[in-house]
Image: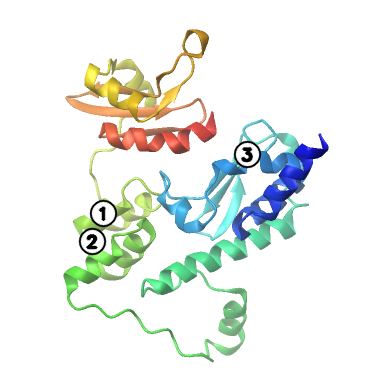
């Protein structure tokens, strides 16, 4: 046991700044020891950039209470919240964890601002210092605004801003809708805001009940690809692997689904559903 505890102490020492803040918040909310909390942290991205590459692109993680307690980043407000089905113990400790929540929120706002500035866009969130300056001095700049990145032509500039959902949404918010920006945003946390701003009415994926009612078998080629890529559950007899992706055909369209009882990803391609498995398996 001493060796195991020492191992997890080393794991804690090697966590990224974001993961350490998540660990501190989890510890206060659940009452679990840090060495217990950290056991699931190999599932989670260690930087905001890597979170943004995940399906949905939004920081959201399950706490270590073995329940349904989740902490979610709210991109509109720039803060975190608990999901409604979190355990009563975690809800009771939410106010107590105020300092840990605020530290995590400040870090995430700073990281979003850093990524926006590096992309030549305006910061997404004001810092506490900027809010005070705005209130008392009606916005007085004490440092020069970082210059925007220069581009040789509009196509290069557009291509640069489609690399991440965040930069695609921010650029569209500033410059207007473009199909390439919309393609970069789709499936991320910014999709609802993009749809609302530009009145995007593309058909959404059917709900889970409809998908299940129209479930169909993967063909041999699809099944082999899923198994080859390792997107499998070990639910078969004796732990035999079974596909973690299934198919549904609704109104002439094919959808591929990867899900658990806690989360789901619905994709128009088999490749997309297979890629989603890396995140979905963390919710099992």
**Which residue lies at the image location 48% right of the left edge and 7% below the top edge?**
237
Q: Quadrant of residue 61?
A: top right
Residue tagged 3: 40
Between circles 3 and 1, the one closer to the viewer is 3
Viewer-proximal residue among 273 and 104:
273
**In this image, 106 relative to 125: left or right?**
right
- Name the mark on residue 177: 2
Q: Quadrant of the N terminus?
A: top right
Q: Disc 3 and disc 2: Cα gap in Å?
A: 39 Å
Q: Residue furthest top?
A: 237
For the C terminus, the image quarter is top right
Relative height, residue 190 to residue 278 (above, below): below
Q: Nearer the viewer, mark 3 or mark 2?
A: 3
| Secondary structure type for disc 3 | helix
Whole-number angstrom distance, CA of label 2 to CA of label 1: 7 Å
- Callout 2 environment at 10 Å: few (<14), some (14 to 19), or many (20+)? some
Position in image of residue 101 (x %, y %): 67, 56
**Horizontally, is 92 left or right of 169 in the view?**
right
The crowding category of the residue bearing disc 3, from other C-alpha atoms within 10 Å (few below 14, some 14 to 19, many at least 20), is few
Question: Horizontal placement of 193 versus 64: left or right?
Answer: left
Does residue 73 appear anywhere in the picture? yes
Which numbered disc covers residue 168?
none
Depth check: give the residue in front, 19 or 203: 19
Which callout, 3 or 2, points at the residue further toward the start of the chain? 3
The residue at which mark 1 appears reads as 182
């Amino acid at each position: 046991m001493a060796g195991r505890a020492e191992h997890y102490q080393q794991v804690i020492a090697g966590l990224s700044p974001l993961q350490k803040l998540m660990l501190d918040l989890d510890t206060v909310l659940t009452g679990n020891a840090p060495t217990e909390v950290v056991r699931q942290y190999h599932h989670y991205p260690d930087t905001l950039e890597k979170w943004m590459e995940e399906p949905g692109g939004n920081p959201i993680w399950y706490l270590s209470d073995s329940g349904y307690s989740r902490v979610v980043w709210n991109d509109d407000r720039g803060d975190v919240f608990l999901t409604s089905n979190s355990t009563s113990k975690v809800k009771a400790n939410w106010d107590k964890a105020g300092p840990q929540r605020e530290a995590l929120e400040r870090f995430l706002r700073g990281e979003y601002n850093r990524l926006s500035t590096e992309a030549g866009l305006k910061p997404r969130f004001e810092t506490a210092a900027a809010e005070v300056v705005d209130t008392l001095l009606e916005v007085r700049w004490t440092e020069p605004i970082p210059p925007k990145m220069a581009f040789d032509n509009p196509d290069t500039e557009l291509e640069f801003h489609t690399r991440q959902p965040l930069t695609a949404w921010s650029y569209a918010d500033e410059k207007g809708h473009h199909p390439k920006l919309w393609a970069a945003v789709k499936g991320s946390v910014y999709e609802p805001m993009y749809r609302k701003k530009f009145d995007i009415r593309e058909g959404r994926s059917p709900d889970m009940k409809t998908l299940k009612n129209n479930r169909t078998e993967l063909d041999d080629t699809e099944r082999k690809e899923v198994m080859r890529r390792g997107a499998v559950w070990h639910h078969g007899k004796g732990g035999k692997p079974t596909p973690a992706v299934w198919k549904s055909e609704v109104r002439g369209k094919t959808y591929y689904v990867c899900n658990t009882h806690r989360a789901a990803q619905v994709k128009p391609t088999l490749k997309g559903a297979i890629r989603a498995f890396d995140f979905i398996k963390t919710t099992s």
